[in-house]
Image: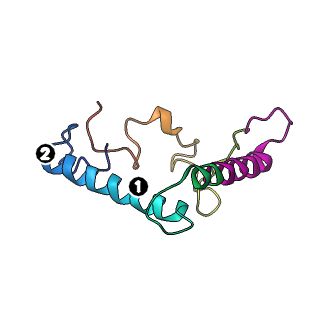
Amino acid sequence: MQKFDKDGDGKLGPAERKAAKEKLQAHRAALAQKVDKNGDGKVSPAERKAAGEKLQALRAAILKNFDKDGRRQAQPRRVEHRQAGPPGAGEDPSGGPRPEPSDRTQTPHQSKRPAR
């Protein structure tokens, strides 16, 4: 919804709703065109089944890449964030460590949009 809420008021107005509907219809048409293998403009039960099987195989392949313990659940990847810059860049000029982002009142990447 946020993608289509151009004025940022938290609601979709008539023009925003129309744009969202048109985008969804275009996406569905493109998907149907990919699935419609014989080009008759309709998705037959056989074409629907083949698309479902292809999607299922794709999901299984993705899961296989992330399933490290064999429990058929993807494990979140832990990413360590480091301060960029020369040695000492993570320190305060006074010599002490720089406060963690949670200790600051605002971080540079915080959104300017109001909370919903």
The boundaries of the magenta stretch are 51-74
Residue drawn 57% across and 51% down? 48
The numbered mark, 1 or 2, whose residue comes first in the sequence reads 2
Q: Position of residue 105 (x, y in %)?
A: 38, 35
Name the residue carrying label 1.
Answer: 28
The label nearer to you, 1 versus 2, is 1
Q: Is residue 71 magenta?
A: yes
- Residue 107, quarter of the rendered image: top left
The kind of secondary structure the magenta stretch mainly shows is helix
Tell me residue 68's x, y (percent).
Answer: 84, 41
Residue 65 placement, left or right of 56: right
Residue at the far left in the pictured view: 14
Q: Quadrant of the N terminus?
A: top left
Name the residue carrying label 2: 14
31 sits left or right of 5 in the view: right
In percent of the image, x 63 and y 52: which residue is there? 82
